[in-house]
Amino acid sequence: QVQLAEAGGGLVQPGGSLRLSCATSGSIFSGYTMAWYRQAPGKQREVVASLRPNGITTYDFAVKDRFIISRDNAKNTVFLQMNSLKPEDTAVYYCNSLPSFISWGQGTQVTVSS
């Protein structure tokens, strides 16, 4: 069974940066679109960035030009570089395929606050 393990979250001031990583236990994602999702308190989980096997990326308007998604197929890892963070980016961040068919990991908390 494929498992996901997100890491890299934390507390950061507005304008700061964080780099999230998501390791998988299997080599399933080299042929799949992978995505980062986030869920803020009281809100539904939403897709913020996705990366197709051919390298095409898609970003939610709210994070476009600030976040960068990338992947290392050899290491079964997907990354999310987050720059110019804003308080509204505060959420638990998850990775999964898109559409999501892998069991969800625990996510990693990102808190943007001064």
Image (tube, rainbow, N blue to C red):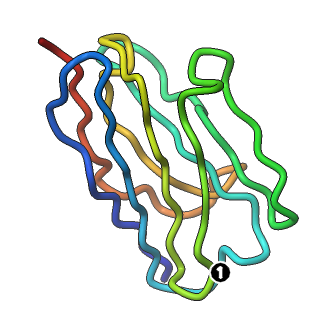
Does 20 appear above or below 111?
Answer: below
Q: Residues within 10 Å of mark 1 (few under 14, many from 20)?
A: few
Instruction: Give the vertical position of 3 relative to 37 (above or below).
Output: below
Determine whether, in the image, residue 82 is placed left or right of residue 18: right
**Residue placed at 54% from the left, 35% from the top?**
67
> Could you say where residue 73 lies in the image, as x and y percent from the top left?
63, 80
Percent of width and height locating residue 101: 63, 59
From the viewer's perspective, is 9 left or right of 94? left
- Decide: is 22 above or below 99: below
Coordinates of residue 39 in the picture (x, y in percent):
40, 28
Q: In screen coordinates, is 100 left or right of 66?
A: right
Q: Is residue 104 above or below residue 89?
A: below
12 vs 76, nearest the viewer: 12
Quarter in which the C terminus is drawn = top left
Q: Amino acid at mark 1?
A: Ile
Residue in the image at 54% along x and 28% along y? 66
What residue is rendered at 55% in x and 56% in y? 96
Residue on which disc 1 sits? 28
Residue 23: x percent and y percent?
42, 72
Q: How many marks?
A: 1
Image quadrant assignment for residue 59: top right
Q: Secondary structure at mark 1?
A: helix
Q: Nearer the viewer, residue 101 or 21?
A: 21
Q: Residue at x 61, y 58 (%)?
A: 70
Name the side, left or right, on which 101 lies relative to 6: right
